[in-house]
Amino acid sequence: MDLKKLESLSTEKSNPKTSELDKMSALEIVTIMNEEDQNVPKAIQNVLPEIAQAVDLIVKGFNAGGRLFYIGAGTSGRLGVLDAAECVPTFGTEPEMVQGLIAGGMKAMTIAVEGAEDDIDLGRQDLIDHQLTENDTVVGIAASGRTPYVIGGLEYAKEINAGTIALSCNHNSEISKHAEVGIEVVAGPEVLSGSTRLKAGTSQKLVLNMLSTASMVRIGKTYGNLMVDVRPTNEKLVERAKKMIITVTGVDEKTAESALKESNNSVKVAIVMILNQVSAKEAKKELTVANGFIRKALGK
């Protein structure tokens, strides 16, 4: 990309409000950063319909047995890896269900891999290596909206008819042209010119929160606003699991603890056991028939 095109990007422009950033006091710096950050949710509000379309596409893939892949470079790639990793403990998913791919591999999470983001063939190859199928969905993430690694991945995904979503922070981004759904969150120039780990990164994080959370809700990973598929892998999460069982069923702590043990630490199974007055085995069957939705298993 030539200099003229680069300077036309919102994420690369200089912010006139911070032209004398190096002269500001600590309080002045954090104050202007806070003021600028308030533009992020406003920018996201403008693209909620596109985010909802993306959720529907992801859910369609999940319901067909597909997976969700985030693909990006630098900060964008790291945010995708983070969101994917959080799905496992939060929603009890298998690690393969939501995956984050970053240009240069996992070592790029902490150390920049020179040239990786500019390799269009690498994005394609990473998805080939993960045996992408037409039931999978790929979310290409690039603040600039032009990262070759992401474009390569989206192009390959389209070739095999996988779902494609582009998440960028500039209008009319290049990656949007390679996706079924283009999400363009434009929050304006950064406080520190070109540092897209700031407002652009915050925008991407909030949108990724929406994509994964809304998709998981839509496939039955919650009951009300409770994360009933949480994996209670530590003391805090065990207590949280018991609290959820108590909240939904109204039983005492001892009964909740007993049901959680019988259900092999499955909050969902424990709830159905108690409310339908069935064994753990029968509760599992009822949840299977209900496609994992507690409400359906309870006949609500």
Image (cartoon, rainbow, N blue to C red):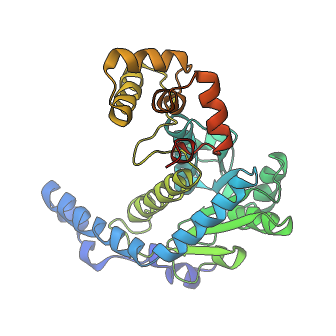
Residue 240: image x %, image y %?
37, 28
Q: Residue at x 47, y 59 (%)?
A: 210
Q: Residue at x 44, y 76 (%)?
A: 186
Residue 86: image x %, image y %?
51, 40
Drawn side of residue 63 relative to residue 171, left or right: right
Drawn side of residue 223 relative to residue 53, left or right: left
Identify the image quadrant of the N terminus: bottom right
Quarter where residue 227 is shown: top left
Drawn side of residue 272 relative to residue 105, left or right: left
Q: How many marks?
A: 0
* Closer-to-camera residue (118/251): 251
* Closer-to-camera residue (236/115): 236
Q: Residue at x 58, y 84 (%)?
A: 172
Give the vertical position of 216 relative to 230 (above or below). Answer: below
- Residue 108 visible from this viewpoint: yes
Residue 257: image x %, image y %?
41, 17
Quarter where residue 26 is shown: bottom left
- Residue 187 visible from this viewpoint: no
Q: Residue at x 51, y 46 (%)?
A: 295
* Closer-to-camera residue (12/49): 49
Residue 142: image x %, image y %?
58, 65
